[in-house]
Image: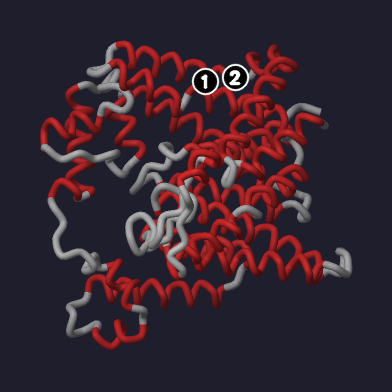
Amino acid sequence: MRTWLCLSISVLLLPLFPAAGIVGLLVVLIKVWHGHYRQIIAERLNQGWVILAGLLIISSAFAARPQESWLGLANFLPFFALFMALRVLIRKPVQLRQLSWLLIFPSLPIVMLGFGQLYAAWETPAIIESILGWKLVSQGVPQGRMSAVFINSNFLAIYLTIAFALTLGLWLEIWQSWQQKSTTKHAYVVLALLSLILLFDFGGLVLTSSRNAWGLSLIILVAYAIYLGWRYCLWIAGIATTVILWIFFAPNSDSTQLRQIVPAFIWLRLSSQSYSSVSIEKLRLTQWQFCWDLIEQRPLLGWGLRNFSPIYQSKTNFWLGHPHNLFLMLGAETGIISTLLLMAIVGSIMTQATILFINWSDSNFKPIFFSYLVAFASCILFNLTDVSIFDLRVNTTIWILLSAISGVVAESTKPS
């Protein structure tokens, strides 16, 4: 009970008070490992993470720049251990509901800070950054895009995407219970609160100007529409997609009228016309081709974690933090074997979770479990065109989602 309380407080504090949240999660990790060590090491899934950890360590030992690679292990090894611990702690569907509230609630003040950042030029004094570990930059990072308490708008975008998907699951659960008259008379208050969070999260997603987040928001809505059988929503989504594609691909003369309807900052961002010129080194196709070349040169162990940036800079005289595709980056930095093993472990968890969802008999918790599947799937899609592991809060949140999904699957499928 105390461990779950510590986890709950840590998850709630993580986005706005990251140091306190991480310390709390470390306490949870130590307590669970101390009490369930034998159970943890006996699990076959956890043995897969141990093998993957070993491969990453070997890759670091033979890296082009070993020191960088050893530091890069911090983005993976602690989270493998956290996954194993939380998978033991989070086993019941009711815990997923509680965890959803803890994950989404901070998004409301975060977006409020983002609005102040963009429209009131809010910024935090240096002392806030030293205490909380983040700062509010007037007009956002990059300028004109909401980033709120994150160092970049793209990290805010994936955080809000997760919150948006989970909030929809909570909203749907309450709404269905209300329709069936199986909930309390205060359900409308909860629905109103969830609707407010949805509105703020969606507004924040739009103002991040993240094309990934815009696309994922549409995919999330389509996923829920399919789940509910709302065909008219699919038609609306289809029309919206057609309009977007027409604005994006059609000649300026043919799409002028639509561009008068759609806000300028949206179609300018979609068509990349908000930039006067983009160097070839910034293009994703250039980065991905470079990764592929690195994979071909060292396919087994890769070049080492965090080695992409210095290698890319040495070849192009252009510094780039990451190649905007997690799997190509891992293939180049850790080798094909490690990357395929990671994909196999995560893929097996999601496959079992999907099967469990299809066969789930308890309709009360089905929307909540569905929201976790959608939220984590969104994270996977986001990482096809970006990399989210370099923000501690986002990376931790994604691992919490995966461990929660895996824990419930393990509990639901264990022999009775």
Residue density around tag 2, few if under 14, some if 14–19, many if 20 or more, within 10 Å: few
Q: Residue at x 28, y 76 (%)?
A: 246
Q: In the displayed orientation, state which residue is furthest to the bottom.
A: 257
Cβ atoms under marks 2 and 1 closer than 8 Å: yes
Q: Quadrant of residue 195?
A: bottom right
From the top left corner, tell me how far across and down residue 215 is, in percent.
41, 61
Report how many numbered discs are placed on residues in the image: 2
> Please, what is the three-letter code of the amino acid marked with disc 2?
Arg
Which quadrant of the figure has residue 13? Answer: top right
- Could you tell whether 55 is left or right of 255 in the image? right
Query: Which residue does the numbered mark 1 point to in the structure image?
Result: 48
* Residue 350 shows in this picture: no
The secondary element bearing badge 1 is classed as helix
Residue 333 percent location from the top left of the image: 29, 26
Q: Residue at x 46, y 69 (%)?
A: 120
Please report the residue visible at 43 percent of the width from the left and 55 percent of the height from the top: 147
Q: Amino acid at mark 1?
A: Gly
Q: Residue 41 versus residue 119: which sits nearer the camera?
A: 119
Question: Residue 368 location in percent, x, y?
Answer: 69, 52
Residue plotted at (17% across, 78% down): 251
Q: Which residue is mark 2?
A: 44
